[in-house]
Image (cartoon, coloured by chain):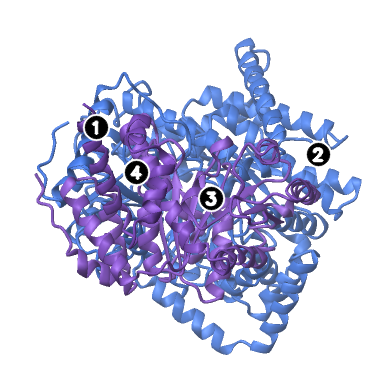
Chain colours: A blue, B purple
Amino acid sequence: MSTPERDKPWLMRTYSGHSSAKVSNELYRTNLSKGQTGLSVAFDLPTQTGYDADHPLARGEVGKVGVPICNISDMEMLFDQIPLSKMNTSMTINATAAWLLALYVATAERQGVAPVQLQGTTQNDILKEYLSRGTYIFPPVPSVRLTTDIIAYTVKNIPRWNPTNICSYHLQEAGATPMQELAYAISTAIAILDAVRESGQTSVEGLEQVVGRISFFVNSGIRFIEEACKMRAFSELWDRLTHERYSVQSEEMRRFRYGVQVNSLGLTEAQPENNVQRIVLEMLGVSLSKKARARAIQLPAWNEALGLPRPWDQQWALRMQQVLVFETDLLEYSDIFDGSPVISDKVKLLVDGATQEIARVQEHGGMIQAIESGYVKRQLVNSHTERMRSIESGSLKIVGLNCYQETEESPLTCGKDSGIMRVDPHAEHEQIERLNAFRAKRNINDVNIALASLSETARNGSNIMLPSILCAHAGVTTGEWAQALRDIFGEYRAHTGIDIPLNDDTRSARVAEIRMQVSKTGEELGRPLRLLIGKPGLDGHSNGAEQIAVKGRDVGFEIVYEGIRLTPEQIAKAALEEGVHLIGLSVLSGSHIEMIEDVFSQLNKIGLKGLPIVIGGIIPESDARLLRENGVAAVYTPKDIDMNRIMVDILNLIRRTNNLEPVLI
Amino acid sequence: MSRIILPEPELLAIAVSGQDRLALANALNLLDDRRPDVRKCAATFLDALLVHQPESIGHLIGITGPPGVGKSSLTSALIKVWRKRGFRVAVLAVDPSSQISSGALLGDRLRMHDSGTDTDVFIRSLACRGESGGLSAEVWPMSMVMLAAFDIVLVETVGIGQKEIDVSKMTDTTCFVVQPASGDSIQFLKAGIMEVPHVIVVNKEDIGVSALKTLSELQNSLRRQTDKEGWQVQALSVSAVLCNGIESLADLLDSHRLWLLENGKFAAHRQRCQSEWLVKHLREEFGNYGIGLLGGEDAISQCLAASAPRRSPISEYESIRDLTIHAMKIKN
């Protein structure tokens, strides 16, 4: 018997980067030596939102969720001893994608590598940033123009580059059902391809090349059979779309290519070891069907809901892939789902549902308009609220979270480091010092010339990549590049989508009781109870804050929703002007300690000492303790799923602050 | 029961006139408070404030229009222009609340981020708390307090259908915002069903030709329309997002204020706003029956206009309320 021919293994990556370019470079080289076959760079939030490390909004965020890249010397350090001619690098970068790609190209040039040799991916999908994740800077129209510039540039100059990775990943994190994921990702692709076609930067044959370079970044959840069907549905929808709408003749160019990061939304902080089996099952959804198999997979670490993973945790995630690829027989077969009526029925259901929703988005004038009007965001907030309600009610079971909660003490989290990595607290200070040293020794004349040419290009509509590469070589910083464009394009605030109809859950006696008590306390205190909800810092993952805002409204609080990217000064100012009874802040980037310190000092400064603050986010227990000691009234983490209890807590905090007895509900 | 700590009304009035931000915030909280003792304190505070600032000053502007037309972005753009001109600006952003839970989501300040740390800008959001007409009872007294500390006070409200410009009864100048080719509102305006605002703004000029078409349609149909006082209605198109035409809008709004002043109508207009507010809340509390007992709406307005010196809204309301109750007792 002959050995069956094995399918080629996919690219194996780990999303990583933190503290500094030097530390991340060491991490990358270690990971590569362990058998990782590509790099996936995580940038910190100031880099993603176009601020230098010394900008006030960057405080507490430098090096936290990724590596800080302020200029070309950081980029050179990041890829020190990593030959870019051989590397396949994926960069999770969106609003500043053109800039980071320019730095990458310039770094390659300094290594003696021509752009044509480079391989990799820029995420470069700005539209989903307005719906989830939140690292946008400019309004949609100029942002999409930057996206198309990158596409036009790479198709000509870096033919093996994936210029945009259209992300359904973050849509699932924001609550999308599989059908919605399909519909909104395809709608995004339509918006981008239409923009490329209208930009006039490519010919008809050029458009075929562009279609061939479009890749997707997909999420895979725990319902892995449905996820496998979703991937087959994606292939079908993409093939049809590119053939019919863009007249792409070559089947090869119409192939649906995608990378995956499996679901983080479903990972639990409670009994976090169970996340290992969740991750493995989720990986099956995107690898079982040969016809719709991922080109690249990166897995989260088991402890993502606790904090930043350590090198060992990342190694474990990599080994999961290696066991599936090298030990199992998965890669030996042709497609194992072909001919299954169950699968093809399910695929059809998804394709039909998505096709209808795509048409609805087109009725709204396309994806950009449907985002600007808030339509898509509202659909997502609705789905996410549904999900939270079913977890709360127990109809959606999550082991360890809302059932089977009893557990032995975990040896994984009882160590000295509580099972997570901590970024060196000096990283921010050191990065600022390096930045200042870099600024001191560059030729300011070159910088000004390069920036002037960037501004001119931004205004006149030519391709942004060339002046950006010039800026990279001249020593322009990330903050300067972004500011030049902010001055021309303006800044943007996305729709929050929280204006969804109230869920009048009359069956819930508890909700009715809370409503009654909220209203009663309002009468006792003379006026309706008001909460300020917002997100300090640069982290744009607003789902948590949005859910609390909607729930607060549902139980009768008046919610002043401030949205994302707030400075401590803005928070204090809003609390004063709005006369709120309590402030609720959400922080997911790990910068909570610095942030809260500053908020307290701003509140004291303007005479609001004693106003209660509660915090939600990914906050390790030891930090939570510290926050409470520093005066935070309550800390909530992903394991607090009982939203009604949080509402009662908040009510009682307000009562206690105002010398009223707490109520029992 | 929580002990009520009441502020000293005199001191609070002095601090608000002195532009103390914390005092202003506390004063607004005070006006929001419905407890009887606190309401008395609020009345005393407003009277004291009137003593410190007897003249009608500042400019009270209402911005209204259907949802999604870009009112908050327009407000944000106007704030920028006014700040450049050196004016201090306060905003009362009114949003609807849920009829069921009485909770509310107030998200307007989100779109006014640019003024995030400017202490010469003050934004208070207000839920309209299920009242008909889209305006809370608190709007009028709160506007008065804000006017004591800011040059320009802007009241932003959502208006749908014919109720769209209820805010015009409570502001010096009303600005109505429409979208290009937005059928209903423009039809109402043209048909004269809706009360006429002072300024009509066609926003989203950036969308293209349809804004200009809408504008010229409006200008044609409004050519000879004036409001009750004889002001010729004006229309213009702007783009709040691109900050186009905002300077002209600011000029136009101010020209209405100057027109009121030059024609000696300013103080009377404010007094009329106050009587509209009083009658509205009297009607809410006692119905048409109560209004009838006092001789009808016009009689009340005339009586109020005659009463000098001018009194603060809550005191005036309380006394007219006593009158009504007295009349009811006699009747029964």
Question: Looking at the picture, how far across and down is residue A313, in whole percent?
Answer: 39, 48
Q: Nearer the viewer, mark 4 or mark 2?
A: 4
Answer with mark 4 or mark 3, whichever residue precedes in sequence. 3
Is label 2 in a helix, a strand or a loop? loop
For label 4, the SS is: strand
Vertical arrangement, residue A102 with respect to residue B277, above or below: below
Q: Subunit of mark 4?
A: A
Q: Quadrant of the N terminus of chain A?
A: top right
Q: Label 4 vs label 3: CA separation?
A: 53 Å
**CA neighbours of label 3 inside 10 A, class few (<14), some (14 to 19), many (20+):** some
The residue identified by callout 2 is A253
Badge 1: residue crowd in 10 Å (few <14, some 14–19, many ≥20): some
- From this view, report whether residue B241 is shown above or below residue A479: above
Classify A345 as above or below A297: above
User: Whole-Å distance between the Cαs marked 3 and 1?
Assistant: 90 Å
Q: Nearer the viewer, mark 3 or mark 2?
A: 2
The quarter in which the C terminus of chain A is drawn is top left
> Which quadrant holds residue B34?
top left
User: What is the number of the mark on residue A62?
Assistant: none
Dots 2 and 1 on the same chain: no
Of residues A458 and A477, the one drawn nearer to the viewer in this rendering:
A458
Count residues near mark 2 (Cα–Cα under 10 Å), then give few for <14, some for 14-19, many for 20+. Answer: some
Q: Chain of mark 2?
A: A
Depth check, mark 3 against mark 1: the one in front is: 1
Q: Describe residue A208's horizontal placement relative to residue A83 as left or right.
A: right
Nearest to N terminus: mark 3 or mark 2: 3
- Residue drawn at x 46%, y 68% is B58
Chain ID at mark 3? A
Q: Secondary structure at mark 3?
A: loop
Q: CA distance from mark 4 to mark 2?
A: 52 Å
Q: What residue is shown with label 4?
A: A558
